[in-house]
Image (cartoon, rainbow, N blue to C red):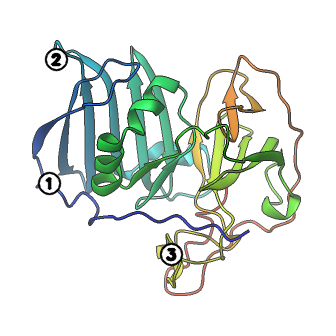
Amino acid sequence: MTHKLSVSLLGLFGACTAGGSDRLEISQPNALGATAFERAHSSSDGGEHFELIALDAADREVARVALRTGEVPALQTRLPGADTLGSEIVLTTAGNQQRVISHEVSFHVLQMIDEPALRELMTLPTVATILADEAHILVQASAPMERAYSTQSCPSSYMLQTPTAAQCCFYSMYSTSGTMFVTPAGDVSNRVGPATPCTAFGGGSCSGADCYYGPQGFARAQFSNNGQYPSIYSDPFGGCGADNQHSSEFGDVYGDSPNNQGCPGGGTGAGQWDY
C-alpha cells in the first residue's frame, strides 16, 4: 500500500504572530456544546506552543488542545538514547487529560483520541482547518459506515525486531493506515504508514531526519497512555481502538525489521522511527 496524506498547509505556526490570540465562532452543533474557540501561539524555551480552547455559550471552557514542540524529557522513558527533541499534545475535556508524545515535530496525525466528543469537535470544518493550517494537527474522522475500512494483526514485516509489539493491530481506512499496539511501558503506540520509505509528508524527496516517513515507510511513533492495562480492539467507528473497557482482539507480534535505522542524507535520524 502506498500511503499519502495531503492538506493545504501554511508554515508551521505561521498564521498568527508569536504571542497572538484570537476568537472564532463555531456554527456546527456538537456534543460538547462549544460555540466558539480561542487560539494562541507563542515561542519560548527553544520551542513553539499552540493552544485551541473551546468555549460554550457562557464562555466556559469545555475542551482544550495544546501542542508544544521542543524538548520532551518523557521521550527518554519510552525510547533508548538521549534524544529528547519532539512534540507533546495534551487533549483536555471535562477534567480528563490525554497526553500524546512523539519525536515528530512537523506533522501530527492523531488517530488516538480517547474522548469521542472531542474527536467530533476537532473534525468540525472550522476547527479542523485551524488545527491543520496553524498547528499541522490532522485528525481522522470516524469512518462513515458505508466507507470501507479493515483491521488485522500487524504483518511482522511492518514491525521492529525489538521490542515486542503487544496486541498489534494494523488498520486501513479510506484516507490513512497504520499500526497500533501496546509498548512494554504500557503506553499505546500509533504509527502512520506504510508509505514509500524515507519520503516527505505527502510524498516527495527528503534528506535524513527531515523525512516524515522513515526507513520502514512509517511515521515516527506516537505514545499515549490510554489507561491502566489498555486493550487494543477493532473499533466499529474506524480502525483500531484502545481503552481498558474492551477485551483484546489482537496478539503480540515479533517484527522482522532492524532497529536504529535512519534515512540517507545529513543527520540520518537513526533511531527516531523506533518504538
Q: Amino acid at mark 2?
A: Asp
Return the residue at label 3: 200
Return the residue at label 1: 16
Dot 2 surroundings within 10 Å: few (below 14), some, or many (20 or more)? Answer: few
Q: Which of the 4 image quadrants contains residue 61?
A: top left
Q: Is residue 204 above or below residue 179?
A: below
Q: Is residue 1 left or right of residue 201?
A: right
- Work out how far the residue at label 1 is from the one at label 2, CA to CA, in angstroms: 22 Å
Q: Amino acid at mark 1?
A: Cys
Q: Is residue 269 left or right of residue 66?
A: right
Please provide percent x and percent y for residue 39.
20, 39
Dot 3 surroundings within 10 Å: few (below 14), some, or many (20 or more)? Answer: some
Q: Is residue 27 above or below residue 10?
A: above
Return the residue at label 2: 59
Q: Is residue 45 above or below residue 91?
A: below
- Residue pictured at 33% horizontal, 64% vertical: 9
Please provide percent x and percent y for residue 223.
58, 42
| Secondary structure at numbered mark 2 | loop
- Residue pictured at 46% horizontal, 75% vertical: 210
Please provide percent x and percent y for residue 111.
57, 43
| Secondary structure at numbered mark 1 | loop
Q: Is residue 165 visible?
A: no
Of labels 1 and 2, earlier in sequence is: 1
Of labels 3 and 1, earlier in sequence is: 1
Q: Are marks 2 and 3 in contact (CB under 8 Å)?
A: no
Q: Are marks 1 and 2 in contact (CB under 8 Å)?
A: no
